[in-house]
């Protein structure tokens, strides 16, 4: 059956800015990283040394600010219909979070927010363990004030006075002809020594370099960063091959991104694990492999780096995650998660009113084979016990039955999960929306037989299986007494009676659900009036942005429908939601506790008044010779174009 979607109507989007006075109350933490004017951008990779372990940066604030203001959720909080809710939230946030931080640090956040007028970059560095048990970490923070260098100087002078007034010693020093201050906040004049495996928050170096505020826990890190930025003896991060490749292929033109040099991280892990081997030598156990053997089997040595980036596109917003690992080095866990480059778009029968759709092209039979090989290499006795146990399954019913052949060899390379709308607006239905799961199989009848055998392992009578015919198909059903799975059961399911499972083998798939009606509706097939998810406006264009060539997985989420249900549930049951949130916020550290106002959903407007800010999103994974990728894209809602 063809799964190539038909042509759709052309979709286009336009961006729209708005006053963000209400949204700022919610997003003040983010806004503090994104405030300023049009400072000339400079690539952070050219300012950091090549031994940087990780970097998190906003390279050019104006791009990030524009994306932030255009975000539909930011515009949502600026809508007049939200005034009753946002006023309370804003007040609570200002008093509990912003006020708490300002009291704790003795500064006015808004004053420092106004100084950020260029890039904001955080770098992470490591000092090898040497004779210590664990390595020590150092941080470098660069905040560019652009054309507000004089204002920055005033703030630094003010900080000097505050530190001196607190009785802490300030030691001036010069690093590569630049003036810095060395002080030990909270530790008096003597300071505190670092322990292994920690950064040094009790020792800071602070100074102004041109228009940038530079703060670090290490003078050496500052010295190397200044040397790298001037193109002297220290090479910059931009020359590091692994960073250079992923920057040019993934991170360039992003308004924010982060990167981890996992090769360096792995070297540190390997050193620590080798030390564990020496401890393990005196406690050898044939069933427990050596730590170094486990590490090698995981295949992490092939992973060069990890990255994420955010992009603001004309059609919407994109988040991308990338693992830099060449195809030839994908072993261990990377061979387990390897997916097939096959069609992963929604099947034609999937209705357009689904809440979510997820399709993953993973070869489950191959995964089992790889896992057996990995465990067999690490701990042969363990795999021997597993093989012995699986080999005995079903022999009491049929001496010739081979469970592994019937089950694992009949697993296909297609896993589909369809989240359907709740049957009603009742609380129990919203909490337990129906879900349909399909497992691809070359012989779904034999796979179903294997599942029937597996039900014999369920204790307390769960092995009582029933089957019935429905429209020429067989539906198998059984219950696990005492088991209730929140959010997955059938509407009105009695927890004491246990969770019910229903499965039906059809051509190419074995269908599962915990709701009998869902299985029946699937077997009936689509009605003549049903519209296909593949025909949703703009879906083809949005999917094309997820990657070139076949995707290895695809996900669709209808945020409008999902939020609608939860939104109205909160409005109608504010005390219940408030109780749940109060329990969570009571555990939060100060100053982030006491945000119960966030749960006053009784002040929310009816959802239809703000529905225009919600739309669907799509996500998908792909792979090439150098990277494993996942992209998540949110098209701009049509009403905001």
Image (cartoon, grey):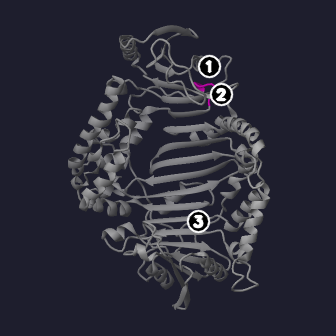
Q: Are marks 2 and 1 in contact (CB under 8 Å)?
A: yes
Q: Tag 3's secondary structure?
A: loop
| Nearer to us in this view, 368 or 324 | 368
Residue 615 position in % (x across, y down) = 39, 58
The spot of residue 521 in percent (x, y) is 46, 82
Query: Residue under circle 2?
Result: 51
Q: Which residues are magenta?
A: 46-52
Q: Is residue 252 visible?
A: no
Q: Residues within 10 Å of mark 1 (few under 14, many from 20)?
A: many
Figure check: 495 above or below 552 = below
Taking the image as drawn, is residue 334 in sight? yes
User: Which comes sooner in the sequence, label 1 or label 3?
Assistant: 1
Left or right side of 98 for 400: right
The residue lying toward the viewer, choosing from 35 and 96, is 96
* Rendered location of residue 606, percent (x, y): 24, 59
In the rendered structure, which disc, 2 or 1, sits on the residue that comes first in sequence? 2
Which SS does the magenta portion mostly show? loop
- In the picture of the structure, the residue carrying the numbered disc 1 is 224
User: Was residue 50 drawn as part of the magenta stretch in this picture?
Assistant: yes
Residue that label 3 marks = 344
**Residue 272, x across and y down, in percent:** 69, 36
Position of 304 compared to 34: left or right? Answer: right
Q: Which mark sits nearer the N-terminus, 3 or 2?
A: 2
Numbered circle sitting on residue 187: none
Q: Nearer the viewer, residue 181 or 385?
A: 385
């Amino acid at each position: 059956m063809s799964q190539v979607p038909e042509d759709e109507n052309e979709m286009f989007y336009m961006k729209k800015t708005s006053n963000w006075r209400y949204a700022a109350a919610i997003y003040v933490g983010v806004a503090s990283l994104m405030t300023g004017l049009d400072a000339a951008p400079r690539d952070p990779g050219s300012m950091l040394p090549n031994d940087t372990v990780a970097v998190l940066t906003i390279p050019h604030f104006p791009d990030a600010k524009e994306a932030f203001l255009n975000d539909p959720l930011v515009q949502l909080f600026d809508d007049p219909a939200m005034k009753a809710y946002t006023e309370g939230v804003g007040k609570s946030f200002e008093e509990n979070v912003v006020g708490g931080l300002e009291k704790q640090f003795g500064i006015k956040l808004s004053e420092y927010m106004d100084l950020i007028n260029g890039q904001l970059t955080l770098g992470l560095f490591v000092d090898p363990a040497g004779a210590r048990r664990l390595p020590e970490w150092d941080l470098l923070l660069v905040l560019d004030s652009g054309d507000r260098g004089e204002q920055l100087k005033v703030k630094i002078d003010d900080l000097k006075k505050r530190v001196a007034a607190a009785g802490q010693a300030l030691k001036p020093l010069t690093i590569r002809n630049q003036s810095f201050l060395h002080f030990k906040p909270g530790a008096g004049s003597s300071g505190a020594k670092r322990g292994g495996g920690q950064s040094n928050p009790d020792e800071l170096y602070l100074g102004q370099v041109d228009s940038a505020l530079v703060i670090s826990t290490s003078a050496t890190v500052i010295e190397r960063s200044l040397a790298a930025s001037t193109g002297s003896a220290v090479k910059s991060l931009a020359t590091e091959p692994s960073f250079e490749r992923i920057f040019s292929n993934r991170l360039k033109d992003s308004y924010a991104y982060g990167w981890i040099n996992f090769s360096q991280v792995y070297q540190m892990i390997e050193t620590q694990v080798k030390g564990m081997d020496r401890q393990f030598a005196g406690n050898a156990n044939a069933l427990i492999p050596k730590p170094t053997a486990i590490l090698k089997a995981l295949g992490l040595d092939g992973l060069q780096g990890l990255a994420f980036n955010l992009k603001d596109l004309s059609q919407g917003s994109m988040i991308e995650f990338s693992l830099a690992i060449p195809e030839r080095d994908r072993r261990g866990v990377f061979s387990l998660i390897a997916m097939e480059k096959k069609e992963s778009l929604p099947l034609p029968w999937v209705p357009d009113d689904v809440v979510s759709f997820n399709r993953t092209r993973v070869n489950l039979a191959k995964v089992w084979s790889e896992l057996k090989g990995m465990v067999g290499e690490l701990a042969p006795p363990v795999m021997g016990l597993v093989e012995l146990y699986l080999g005995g399954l079903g022999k009491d019913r049929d001496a010739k039955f081979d469970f592994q052949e019937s089950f694992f060899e009949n697993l296909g390379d297609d896993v589909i999960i369809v989240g359907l709308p709740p049957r009603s607006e009742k609380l129990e239905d919203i909490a337990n929306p129906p879900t349909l799961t399909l497992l691809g199989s070359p012989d779904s009848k034999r796979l179903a037989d294997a599942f029937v055998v597996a039900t014999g392992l369920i204790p307390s009578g769960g092995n009582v299986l029933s089957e019935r015919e429905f429209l020429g198909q067989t539906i198998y059903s059984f219950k696990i007494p005492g088991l209730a799975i929140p959010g997955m059961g059938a509407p009105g399911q009695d927890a004491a009676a246990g969770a019910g499972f229903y499965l039906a083998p059809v051509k190419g798939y074995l269908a599962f659900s915990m709701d009998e009606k869902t299985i029946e509706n699937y077997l009936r097939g689509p009605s003549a009036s049903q519209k296909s998810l593949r025909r949703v406006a703009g879906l083809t264009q949005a999917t094309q942005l997820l990657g070139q060539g076949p995707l290895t997985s695809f996900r669709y989420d209808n945020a409008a429908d999902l939020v609608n249900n939860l939104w109205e549930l909160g409005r109608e049951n504010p005390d219940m939601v408030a109780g749940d949130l109060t329990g969570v916020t009571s555990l939060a550290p100060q100053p982030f506790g006491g945000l119960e106002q966030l749960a006053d959903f009784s002040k929310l407007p009816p959802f239809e008044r703000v529905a225009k800010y919600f739309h669907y999103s799509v996500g998908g994974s792909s792979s090439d010779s150098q990277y494993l990728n996942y992209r998540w894209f949110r098209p701009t809602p049509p009403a905001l174009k």
